[in-house]
Amino acid sequence: MGLQKSEIMLVAAALAIGLLSFVIPDWLAFTTTLAIASALVVLGVVMLMRAGLVSFGQGLYYCIGGYAVGMGGRFLGVTDALLLIGMGVVVTVALAMVLGLLLTRYREIFFAMLTLAFSMILYGILVKSHNLGSTDGFGVGDWTLLWFDPEGGKGSRTVLWLATGVGLAVALFLNRYFGSSMGLACEAIRENEVRVEYMGMSRRQILYINYVIAAAIGSVGGSLTSLAAGHVDPTMAYWTISGEFVFIALLGGTGHVAASFIAAMIFIMVRTYAVELFPNSWQMILGIVLLMIILFLPKGIWSLFTRKRRVAS
Amino acid sequence: MTEILRTEGLSRYFGAVVAAEDINVTITEGEIVGVIGSNGAGKTTFINMVTGYLPPSAGTIAFDGSPIKGLGPRKLMRKGLSRSFQIPQLFLELSVLDNLSMALSASESRHLEMMRPVRTPERIAAADEILTQMGITQYREEMVTAMPQGARKLLDIAIAMLANPRMLLLDEPTSGVSTEEKHTLMDTVMEVVKRRGLTVLFVEHDMEIVQKYVTRVLAFASGVVIKDGPVEEVLADAKVQELVTGKRRGKNIETQEGGA
Ligand SMILES: Nc1ncnc2c1ncn2[C@@H]1O[C@H](COP(=O)(O)OP(=O)(O)OP(=O)(O)O)[C@@H](O)[C@H]1O
Ligand SMILES: [Mg+2]
């Protein structure tokens, strides 16, 4: 019944964001949108982590999702946000299905470096693409959401609602997924690959499916980010961005889907304030935060919740 | 009496090391076969080849009448060939119930579900049944890391059984278990084996155990089967006493390392 409780909690959180969106200031609506979008990419990183893999290249799909929105509007004249997101997912899935064939052969540092390499290839291509604005990127055109037209001062609210709805759908799916045979099989691979094969399961098939889903979710995160920010540029594929997703994943831990959302919000807030207060040493502050997490909360901030519950019961 | 496993000229070399050479063995359905041999005699290598973990250098293997050489563990599992390990191969950071639920889910279908909880009522019931049979119910919700060695061995064997195999290969089921516990463990295992009517081949260093549970013995030495026959006959053999049982009784038994 824990599952039921999680689902109710997720729906309640989404409703709360929906209601609060009417009273919170614009900057907070924007920050929340970015946090939800990042959390989706982070959830992809978490999916891989549960299988024992660390991706330093999830920015690849984040960037594809972002550019799909920008290019879909610019070159194809598509304006519907859901359609634009869908286009990103299609391109992402197609690419992930190819790269997954190779990547599922690798583990540990080799997997991490290969994912990083692929994202840097995309970065390199985009930097050289002058019709896509090179390093400056380009602006995302006006978009619509079904019958909504986000113009007229309400743009930041519409994208927050969209992100909340999509985020909820993904969270509900992954909450089920993590507790399913497939989700457990990923953890089983992390624990003992020999036994997985001797149970009659295909490690590669499991890792492949998991990888492709993680990529698709990352792409959605990128699309939402570009819809909110109204701009895309190649840094979306740069390795430091992928590193941030890993950072947030470690911050939240793999214990629960909600952890990624909370961690993403904390990360963006801390970064915002750290940059303002210590413009020259904010990276150091993030570094210290990460060090603390690894030392004191190796399973991420989610262990704060489970620890309390265990003490209480 | 139908034949279930047959190997012909089965050999495996690691460079210059002869791990197994020209092994010709035929096992009929329902047999309980013991495998003895000193450290490094090739017992694990033999099991690894039969279960598709290690490609043989030469020879053929047939299971249930059809050739299986070249098939991996996954395919062989589905044909009804299952195994346990000298060192238990478990999901250490998962609960015992999750270890068993995973095994059950995997044995049901090759396509894993994504939206249904892995712990279905049916799987929990089946897991509880085998936990009771094995006498390790008290660890149900524990992580494997919290289990003592003997219980891990039993869980490893339980997982092998959940695949509904026709033949079970057990690599030293009692290694790492105290002498007193060995008999209880084997009683437990053999009772389940009998109930399920499985064909079993198991590696064992303790001759008392061998005599107690098997009808036939394969004696390995330096990668070769030096004797194959009824227990009394094999244990009375001069060569077996010299190379296998004589010198090593009471020695080395608890110090097994390595193997798959
Ligand atoms: N992967 C490997 N690489 C190199 N040599 C190996 C390998 N596996 C086994 N051997 C060698 O093959 C021989 C047989 O090993 P095997 O593990 O089959 O012995 P065993 O009979 O199971 O011994 P034990 O009683 O110690 O488990 C040994 O000499 C061992 O060193
Ligand atoms: Mg061995």
Image (tube, rainbow, N blue to C red):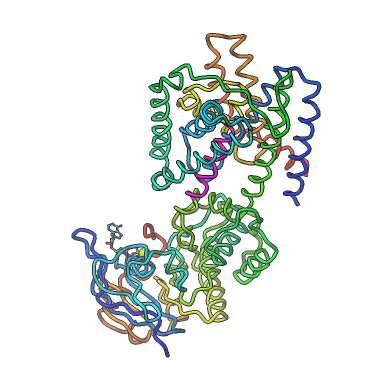
Judged by its main secondary structure, the magenta piece is helix
Residue B121 placement, left or right of B185: right
Residue at figure coordinates x 40%, y 81% from the top left: B4
Q: Quadrant of ligand 1?
A: bottom left
* The N terminus of chain B - image quarter: bottom left
Is residue A211 part of the magenta span, yes or no? yes
Residue at figure coordinates x 48%, y 63% from the top left: A200
Residue A281 placement, left or right of A174: left
Is residue A157 placed above or below B19 in the rendered structure? above
The stretch of residues the image draws in magenta is A207-222
Q: How many marks?
A: 0
State whether residue A295 appears in this view.
Answer: no
- Quarter of the image for residue B56 reads bottom left
**Residue B223 image offset from top left, x and y in percent:** 26, 69
- Quarter of the image for residue A152 reads top right
Give the camera-side residue of A213 and B161.
Answer: A213
**Residue A6 image offset from top left, x and y in percent:** 73, 44
* The C terminus of chain B - image quarter: bottom left
